[in-house]
Amino acid sequence: DTGVSQNPRHKITKRGQNVTFRCDPISEHNRLYWYRQTLGQGPEFLTYFQNEAQLEKSRLLSDRFSAERPKGSFSTLEIQRTEQGDSAMYLCASSLAPGRNEDQYFGPGTRLLVL
Amino acid sequence: KQEVTQIPAALSVPEGENLVLNCSFTDSAIYNLQWFRQDPGKGLTSLLLIQSSQREQTSGRLNASLDKSSGRSTLYIAASQPGDSATYLCAVRYRGEDKLIFGTGTRLQVFP
C-alpha cells in the first residue's frame, strides 16, 4: 500500500502521560500536514512541513505539542502531559509541492482517548 | 475570519434520490476547494478538487461546482446509493495559505 500510514491507530492514555504518533507520507510527497478532529467537527490544522522544515504552526499547537520531520520523510507528533481535552482524532496528510498535483492525501488517523 | 460552513448538517434520503450538499466560504480569495468523504472512525478520502479558475469538476455520479463570487460550492450526488452514506467535508485552501480550512461536514444517510 503506497498511501499515507499512521501509527498507532488507537491510543488510550491516562491524563498527564506523554504520547507520540507517527505518520509516514506517500514517498514522493514533500509536504506533510497534521490536523486534529474532535467529534462532530471538521479537521483543524495544527502544523505542516515542507521536507524537514516546519513552515507553519497553528495557535492550537500549545507548547505541550511538538512535531518533527527530521529527515524529510516520516513525521512524529508528541503530546506531553496529556489532558482530557486532547482526546481527538489526529490526522496526517501529505501532498506534492505547489504547482503540481496539490491534493492532500489523508491517512487513517490516530484516535487518542485521554482518561 | 476565514470560515467554511456546510448545510445541512445531516441528511437522510431514500436510495435513488439526487441530492445537493452545500458549502459556503467567507473569503472569495480561494486557491482551491476540495470535497472529501469520511466514513465513521476513518480518515478522509478526496472526492473532487476544484481550482479557483474552474467552475466544476465531475467524477462518476459526483459533480462539484464552484462560484467564487457568491462564496459557494455544491456537491451533487446523482442516483444516491446506501454505500454513499458517510460524512462529506468541504475544505478550502485560500491564496497565500497552505493549510485547508474545513467545514463541519454533512452527515448523509441513504436508506434502501
Image (tube, coloured by chain):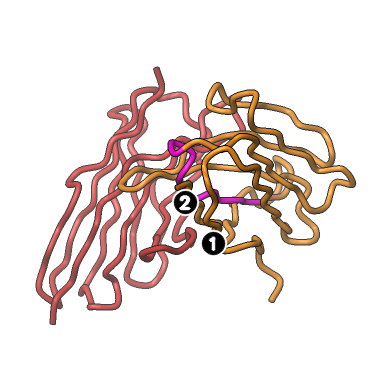
The hue used for chain A is orange
Considering only vertical position in the picture, is B55 above or below B2? below
Secondary structure character of the magenta stretch overall: strand
- Chain name for mark 2: A
| Marking on residue B40 | none
Q: Which residues are magenta?
A: A84-94
Tag 2 secondary structure: strand
Q: How many marks?
A: 2
Query: Residue A37 at what x, y percent from top left?
Result: 44, 45
Q: Are marks 1 and 2 in contact (CB under 8 Å)?
A: yes
Judge if badges 1 and 2 mark residues of a common chain. Answer: yes
Question: Is A87 in the magenta?
Answer: yes
* Residue A10 - label: 1
What is the spatial separation of the Cα atoms under label 1 and label 2, in whole angstroms? 8 Å
Tell me the crowding category of disc 2: few under 14, some 14 to 19, or many 20 or more residues within 10 angstroms, Cα based: some
Residue on which the image places disc 2:
A113
Residue B110 in magenta stretch: no
Identify which residue, B12 or B56, lies in the foreground: B12
Identify the element where label 1 is drawn: strand
Chain designation of label 1: A
